[in-house]
Image (cartoon, rainbow, N blue to C red):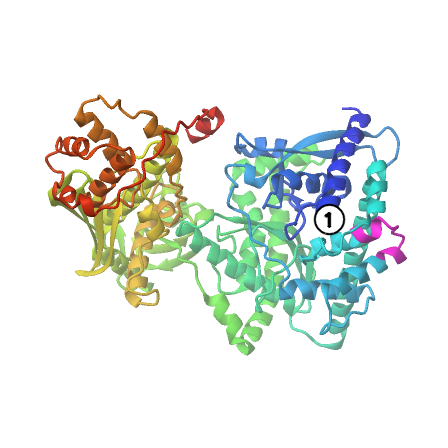
Amino acid sequence: MSNEKVFESRDIVNKIIVDNLRDYGDIEPPALYGRHYNEGTRTKYQFSAANYLRIAAAQREYRYQDIRWLSEQEIADKKFTVKTNAKPVEIEYWEGIDDGQNYEGNLRKFYNAADIVEMDGTEKSIYGSEETDVEYALDLLQANRMDINRNIHSNDQIFSSVKEYAAKNGADEFAAPLTSQLFFKTSHLSYDYVQHPLYTEEQINKLAENPKILFHAMKKAQKVVKSMQMNQELELKNMADKIQNEWNQPFKDLSVDFFWSERCLKDLQGKEYQDGQHFQGEAAYQFLVQLNAADKEQFNSKLQGFGNYDKTKLAIKYGNYDHGEMRIDLGDLELSNKTLISDALVVRFNEYRNYLMTNNQAMNAHIGFQKSQGEEVTREQVIAECEKENTQCEKAMQQFGKEEKQYMGKYPEIKQINEEKADTFLYYCKEQDISKVPTNMVLTIHRADEFDGLIFDQQDTSRALFSGERKLVKPEFNDIIFESAISNDEIKGDIPIKLAFSREDQLAMENLEKLSIKIENYGTVMEPFEAPVVEVYKGKQAVQQFIYEKNYEVNAVRSMNYEEKITRQPQQQMTFSYDGKEFYKLKYEIGSGTLNQAIPSGLPIYNEEKNPINKELQQAVYTQMKYQGIYRDNGIYALNRKNEIRLPDLKVIRAKVMENKPDIRAINSKQFEYYAELATLDFKTDTPVKVMRSMIAEMQQDGLSQKKINNIIKTNKNFDLSLMENNEKVTTMKKRKLQVTMRTSNSQERGMGR
């Protein structure tokens, strides 16, 4: 693509921005909090200058509520699916721009996360203008020597102060207001651009005449804001250095650089850690405490069907041992479910080196890579270097561990956080077989006699929890029980281990048998059964049937939307009981949305949320699901997923049914079928009497004579003729005029429903 085409496309963007300025007072419609960024980069790179304006222009038409964008290449690499109605934005890429010569521009398509099937609905809500947002903005002003009264201030004052600061730092009449606008977006603050537009009409006219003005102004604005942020970081570093010199803080040799995380990490006071923060001493240790806790919490959440692992990038240094940059996947228990940070780090730091020394394939790959870099190394040299670095790491962590134990003695609340454990998997094996278990599968090893009442399943791990095949045995005292983050359905190869169950697990699985669900089927509203058909499900089957009913409803609604037709299902009642006592009852009809709306996620609450029986029941279900495996279709995701129910448009359905209205000379039974279908389009007609009354009303609206109505309803022996005896008391409906609704098929919409 030529540079000219890139600049020509800027003219179009400029025109939209000018329209926005005239309509909204801002470069974009009422905006989201936070700046749009490239989700495909590890640093979550925020779009700058021209691309910031390109996305602002796109907001006019599409109003995206998600600030994440991915390139077309990144989507292909991740094998994501783009929605058929997706609207990409063209993002500028320049090569050779730094030297100012022979540079070349290209436009690449980026898609909003909301237009990617796998990412839709996963955005993190940013509420904006919260207390922490205001504090961040005021701190940024203070770090740049702008005096704002923290107790008496307004957004107008902040906007004016930033605008004045930008002007003093080289921003012209166009760049200065944009600096304030960018500052507010970065700080998650709101501003009334309708009352206080960015530019005057005269300035907007100049922008319309010369597109270069706006793009140069945005480039300058971003430079000023970035400089302000750098000044703040320097200020914070100077403050940290000053505190370090004045006070003998614990962990003075510990430092952590936090680059980014897919999970929102918060400090002990609940304030969110920011990407790019540097921590020293006690602050660094507390960050690692929260990181370890997040690893365990995410693991438990993953077992319960909420999310997966979250990537985190950081660098850790203690004294002379500098491990450098590393990635930790929170939720995979890479910190080994430890209660001491020092223990967790020594395992994580030495993990790759230990793997290298014990895995021939990894060792060969490492030696081959070194050779490709021009360095010849032998296996013995690699092992010697790994052992040396392991020793250095262990020595440093021993000193760290001494500090940590002293610190936790003073701060029991920190100790309590560290001692929270993830709900790991337990496995059994004979003592002589533990060496055959892959090291990455083992977190902590125990002797069997450390557990009271523990049992193991003699069956294969993949068949665990099928009660009819379960053969539970108590281990010998010298047998091995080990904790693991690996579920039974992830185990590959023939490893001599069996699933083990603690006393708590056994109790939970016993409690599940106390759950029962009774489903009473009363037949359809037009053809009810004389007596309901009753099915009772217990334990695991009860949970599976409940999930089936909810999914059945979702599929039924999807089918009705696709076919543009209402299909009535039997009237049912679901009764939940626990330990013989009913605790929840619901009348519903599949397809009406009642079931999914009444119980959107999980099981219904037992009387009240804090009832201990409710916790007992939820734990029973969770334990059952857990031991069926994380990745096998165990139902936990379906149980906890909130399904979106969107019923078909009743007006559209009615119009479609009325298009097939039988001729007035059609037989009465045919007429009956037509009016019965009209009457049952609305799920509110949930009793035979309601249906019959609705049918009579429909026929009256069509102007049928009383005699004709009588003849039609007599074709069905189940119709209650007494409803016609009081017909004189029924208000005569106004006869409706014949309406023909012209409908055009939407092939794209139908295609999406498939």
Q: Nearer the viewer, residue 60 or 269?
A: 60
Q: Taking 407 as reference, is 740 above or below it?
A: above
Q: Is residue 663 shown left or right of residue 93?
A: left
Q: Nearer the viewer, residue 81 or 588?
A: 588
Q: Position of residue 153 (x, y in %)?
A: 73, 69
Tag 1: residue type?
A: Asp
- Is 594 a magenta residue? no
Q: Taking 533 as reference, is 91 above or below it?
A: above
- Is 168 a magenta residue? yes
Q: Is residue 633 visible?
A: yes
Circle 1 residues within 10 Å: few <14, some 14–19, many ≥20: many
The magenta stretch is 166-178
Q: Is residue 342 visible?
A: no
Q: Taking 582 as reference, is 82 above or below it?
A: above
Tell how many labels. Answer: 1
Residue at 47% in and 58% down: 297
* Quadrant of the image containing the C terminus: top left
Q: Is residue 302 shown left or right of residue 111?
A: left
Residue at 87% in and 51% down: 171
Residue at 53% in and 49% down: 310
Secondary structure under the numbered disc 1 in the rendered image: loop
Residue at 86% in and 41% down: 206
Q: Which residue is mark 1?
A: 26
Q: Position of residue 33 (x, y in %)?
A: 64, 53
Q: Nearer the viewer, residue 248 or 383?
A: 248
Q: Nearer the viewer, residue 355 or 109?
A: 109
Q: Position of residue 689 (x, y in %)?
A: 19, 45
* Quadrant of the image containing the N terminus: top right
